[in-house]
Amino acid sequence: MTELLFVLQLALIAYGLYHTFLSVFSLYRRVEDYRSTPPKHSFAVVIAAHNEEKVIGELVKSVFRSDYPRELYEVFVIADNCTDRTSEVAASLGATVIERFNHYKRGKGYALEYGFQRIFALPRKFDAVVVLDADNLISPHFLQAMNHRLARGEKIIQGYLDTKNPDDTWISRSIYVGYLISNRFCQLARHNLGLSCALGGTGMCIATDVLKRFGWGMTTLTEDLEFQTKALLCGLRVTWAHEAAVYDEKPLSLRQSWRQRQRWMQGHCQVAGRYFFRLIWEGIRTRDFKKIDGALYLLRPYFTMGVGVAALLSLLFDFNWSRIDVWWFIKGFSGQYLYLALALFLEKVPLRAYLWLFYYPIFAFTWIPITFAGFLYRHRRSWCHTKHVRNISWEQLKNWNRYRTQREWHGAENPD
């Protein structure tokens, strides 16, 4: 068991060091002068919604508040099996509503596929599709930033994933911190290296020709991850728009967060089981490191489970209370805190967010049982709707001054 533990720990250390090495390339961010690109690309802004009358209105308003020519985009709300006033609210604000009723094929993936088919059949043609969740808000220059990226030849673009409600509970604060770290150390680092970034399910911009080529007929619980993996197999990478922010409502309780993250892990394991060996082989065969890195990304749930197994084996077979060095523990924790705090510093967060790092490790630890649950139930296809009730407007988001208090980089006034 000691030898097995050593081999497992060695593999985990190698995987961890690889991602730590990648994060070094996030220390620099080139500011994109997206305003220098004339508006020319047309967008279909697509929102899949199931009983979202509480939040859909503010999202539609925030899209129409964009500093992008109104004639170059249209908002489509896919009202999926709605029994409330989602359709009425969206239509009253100027969105085009596409209603869908199918009680057997339920979920965002099916709704998007249905909506895309209807939109592509319209006389008007769009250059790209932007996918948003019903509880989102977007920064005013989101479409302008995406127009700039499309003009540079980028085909699949992920926007910056931010939080509408970080101050609510310790769960939402931990999620906020986690997304900041991921945005900087994972997404921006990969983009700077020319690797493929991860799609986040919302804030995505996909060129219409690519979407028509691949379709959205994804059958896993994480259709965004499946789409990015299939695209990567064909040589298309996901790029990252650090300047285009989308604000998402995060769960308030551990129970809500657990259910959401377990679904993500179920889908992640599904995609890994289908595509890992094929993707890594294609990467080796074609000497394309983007594909190899994409395959390593698919192993994340197994890395998390490996950490849990290694910790358990250490406690059972290799733990000795007499060897505990308190100062070693303090130095290790301090080093990790400073490393994670660097991401927050680079993102210029409010000072109180640094305090949230102290209980962020507790939240991070919950990923271990959640990932095991996701792996065990990976073959289940049941979809669970996340209920949203926080009606936060863009004005409140800005006036609360909860985001980037030192520098409003997400505002339309300052691109950085």
Image (spheres, helix red, strand yellow):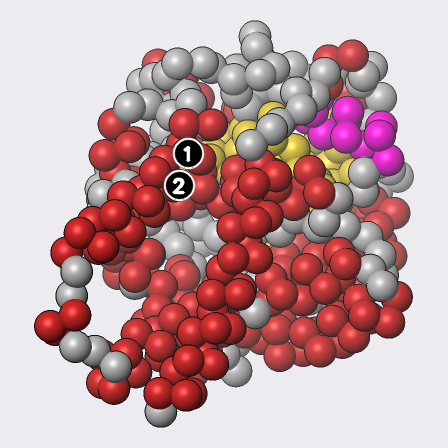
User: Horizontal placement of 146 versus 376: left or right?
Assistant: right
> What range is drawn magenta here?
143-153
- Residue 25: x and y, percent? 61, 39
Q: Image quadrant of residue 43?
A: top right
Q: State the residue position of label 2.
A: 339
Farthest bottom residue in view: 1
- Image quadrant occupied by the N terminus: bottom left
Foreground: 115 or 340? 340
Q: Residue at x 39, y 14 (%)?
A: 406
Q: How many numbered discs?
A: 2
- Image quadrant occupied by the C terminus: top right
> Under tag 2, what secondary structure?
helix
Q: Image quadrant of residue 213?
A: bottom right
User: Horizontal placement of 117 versus 374: left or right?
Assistant: right
Kindly tell me whether residue 47 is visible in this rendering.
no
Up-down: is 327 above or below 57? below
Q: Residue at x 53, y 64 (%)?
A: 15
**Pointers 2 and 1 in contact (C-beta within 8 Å):** yes
Up-down: is 30 above or below 131? above
The kind of residue tagged 1 is Leu
Q: State the residue position of label 1.
A: 342
